[in-house]
Image (cartoon, rainbow, N blue to C red):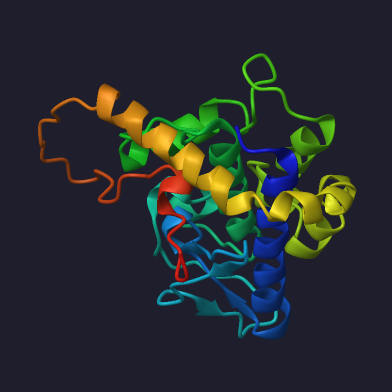
Amino acid sequence: MISEAICSDLVQQMLQGLTYLNTIKKQLHRDIKPENILLNHQGHVKLTDFGISRSLDNTEFLCNTFVGTTNYMSLERLAVKKYDHRSDIWSLGLMLIELVTGKFYYKSRLSYLELIDTIQSTPQPHVDPALFQVSPELTDFLHHCCQIQRLSRASAIELSAHPWILNNMSLRFEAKADVVTNCQVFLEALKRRREKEEQPRMARAEPLKNVVNPQHFLDQMVTSNL
C-alpha cells in the first residue's frame, strides 16, 4: 500500500486547491472525484474539470442545485438540500479512503436511492483498523472529512492544519521522489486484480441508476507529463 506520507502530500495539495477555490475564487468544485485529479511526474497535484463549479455569490455561501457524480456526493447533495464547500470535503474523504484501501468505500453498483439509504443507515466512512494499519491521526483526519452532517465537517483550511498533514511534512521530501513510482506499481496491481475479478455484467434499465461507475483512485490519476 502507499505510505501515509505520500497520501498526506497528495491530500495537502488538494486542500490547497480547494482553499484557493473557496476563499479566493469563492467557488465550489462540486465534482471532486479521481477522474478530476491530475498528478505529474514531479508529484504535483492539480484539480481539473471546473465545468460544473459554482460561484458562491450569496451571503450564506449555500447552493441547492443537483450536479456532479453521485458516487462521491455527500448526503445533503444527494437529498437536494442546501450545501456548501464542505460537500467537497466529503468527496475528498472518500477519495482518501480509496487511496489507502485500494477500493471505493461503498458498493460500486448502488442506485441513487440505495446510496442515500446506505449513507443514512451505516456508520460514517472510515478505514477499518482490523484490515488496514493506519495511524490514529489519519483515522481522526477522516473522521473530520466524512461526517454525515455537513456542519460537522471541517473546512479545507482547518484540515490543512490537522496533525496528520503537519506531522507528515518532515517525511514528505523523502517520499515525494518515489510518489509516482509507488502509484504506478499500485495501479498495475489494481488492474491485475480487476482483470481477475471482472465478470460480464447484464445491462438493466433503471431510471435512477448511477450513470457513472466509480473508478479506483489511482486508476484515474492521469498525468499530463508522464
With respect to residue 143, does 179 lie above or below?
A: below
Name the residue nearer the viewer: 37 or 106.
Answer: 37
Q: Residue furthest top?
A: 130
84 left or right of 219?
right
Q: Quadrant of residue 66?
A: bottom left
Q: Position of residue 104 (x, y in %)?
A: 46, 36
Residue 40, how many percent across, how many down?
A: 54, 66
Q: In the rendered image, is residue 60 in sight?
A: no
Image coords of residue 158 (percent x, y):
83, 59
Residue 159 appears left or right of 127: right
Position of residue 51 measured from the top left corner of the image (x, y, whole percent) = 40, 77
At 49% from the left and 40% from the top, the residue drawn is: 185
In the image, residue 3 sits, relative to residue 75, either above or below, namely above
Residue drawn 65% across and 50% down? Answer: 178
The answer to whether residue 205 is left or right of residue 125 is left
Q: Nearer the viewer, residue 20 or 115?
A: 20
Residue 210 seen in this snapshot: yes
The residue drawn where x is 39% and y is 56% is 69
